[in-house]
Image (spheres, rainbow, N blue to C red):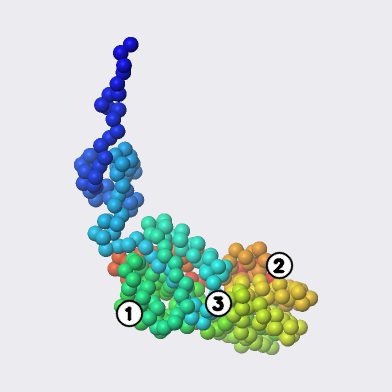
Amino acid sequence: MPKTTKSADAAPPARIKNIIELAKLAGVSPGTVSRALTGKGTLSEKTRAKVVELARQHGFRLNQMASRLRTQRTGVVGVVFPLGHARHQHISDPFFMTMLGALADQLTESGYDLMLSRVVPGDGEWLDRIVDSGMLDGTIVIGQSDQVDTIERVAQRYAPMVVWGKVGFGHCTVGTDNAAGGQMAAEHLIGQGRRRLAFLGDVRGPEIADRLAGARRAAEQAADVTLEAFEVSLSQDDMQAPIAGFVHRHGGEIDGIFAATDLIATTTMRTLREAGLRVPEDVAVVGYDDLPLAAQADPPLTTVSQNVVQGAQALVRALLGRIEGAEAPSHVIVPELVVRGSA
């Protein structure tokens, strides 16, 4: 039998070298090819599928570096956690991890990569170095800490930046009405018949200071209610000792606790239980954040929700607008009380 040979039709397709060649082959413009391969822009699914399949057949890969050089974009957004007053706080903190996960989902769905920075400010130029690095299209700052002056100064010259924190400064901010949330927490404790209240937290950051101010307003408006504030670090490693000291000295005097964060609240409940005090029978406890750990606590934690997912969506939406040169005002999230077993 004569030997069979492969036909020319079976030869692999010629490799395409650039976007223009692929556009000619697909019968579309180079811009359409770019939108099809990056997944950005409006395009029919049929056209997108056609371009993607031709690129696959001909071994074509979009040169992302060249594309970014042409557009002067990096495709990267920086997420920065400045720890000015809470220097021992870690990114593994439950609030940071919850916010980071929500931000990562929103940014990747918008076509951006994320670069993470945990900064312990050593001078007033730390934010300048980040935004001037040339590595980022925009920056999201999580928490103002004691760095409001630095953030305000940089925001005056650097538009693509949005901050999670207290709304009311000159920079574009997304955050909860913390004073309203604090008042809501204290009013709930008072409504439960609690009259000797304690606030646990570190008020050097503007968000926590507002939570205490709101709680004090509620106490002042009620009859026969006292509220005393006790300093407790936001860092998980550093909050244990002051909470234990507070419970040892005041556990039998206090009947209601408003903790500045869910982590402080759940740590306090555990310490109260170890001291022989029952939650909520002896001491009612309310937290702030409504992180996943709140519902899993024993008893489940009554807390003020910041709606972190909604916050992440608002942060990314505002930042993308500012990257494109649009105005993006600050956005206030209305807090909600989530009642569970602790109060």
> Closer to the camera, 320 or 59?
59
Mark found first going from the N terminus, 3 or 2: 3
| Residue type, mark 1 in image | Gln
SS type, badge 1:
loop
Front position among marks 1 and 3:
3
Residue 142 can be seen, yes or no: no
SS type, badge 2:
loop
What residue is rendered at 35% in x and 77% in y? 128
User: Which residue sits furthest top?
Assistant: 1
Front position among marks 1 and 2:
1
What residue is rendered at 28% in x and 50% in y? 34
| Residue type, mark 3 in image | His
SS type, badge 3:
loop
Crowd tier of the residue under label 1, counting other residues whose Cα lies within 10 Å: few below 14, some 14–19, many 20 or above: few
- The answer to whether 286 appears left or right of 273 in the picture is left
| Image mark for residue 156 | 1
Measure how far apart labels 3 and 2 are at the Cα level: 28 Å
What residue is rendered at 70% in x and 83% in y? 245
Q: Percent x, y for residue 44?
A: 31, 45
Crowd tier of the residue under label 3, counting other residues whose Cα lies within 10 Å: few below 14, some 14–19, many 20 or above: some
- The answer to whether 269 appears left or right of 95 in the picture is right
Front position among marks 3 and 2:
3
What residue is rendered at 31% in x and 69% in y? 134
> Closer to the camera, 313 or 230?
230
Q: Percent x, y for residue 193?
A: 71, 79
| Image mark for residue 299 | 2
Q: Which image quarter: residue 196?
A: bottom right
Q: Give the residue number, with chain letter if any, for mark 3.
A: 88
Q: Percent x, y for residue 175?
A: 47, 73
Q: Which image quarter: residue 8?
A: top left
**Is residue 207 positioned above or below 73 on the image?**
below
| Residue type, mark 2 in image | Pro
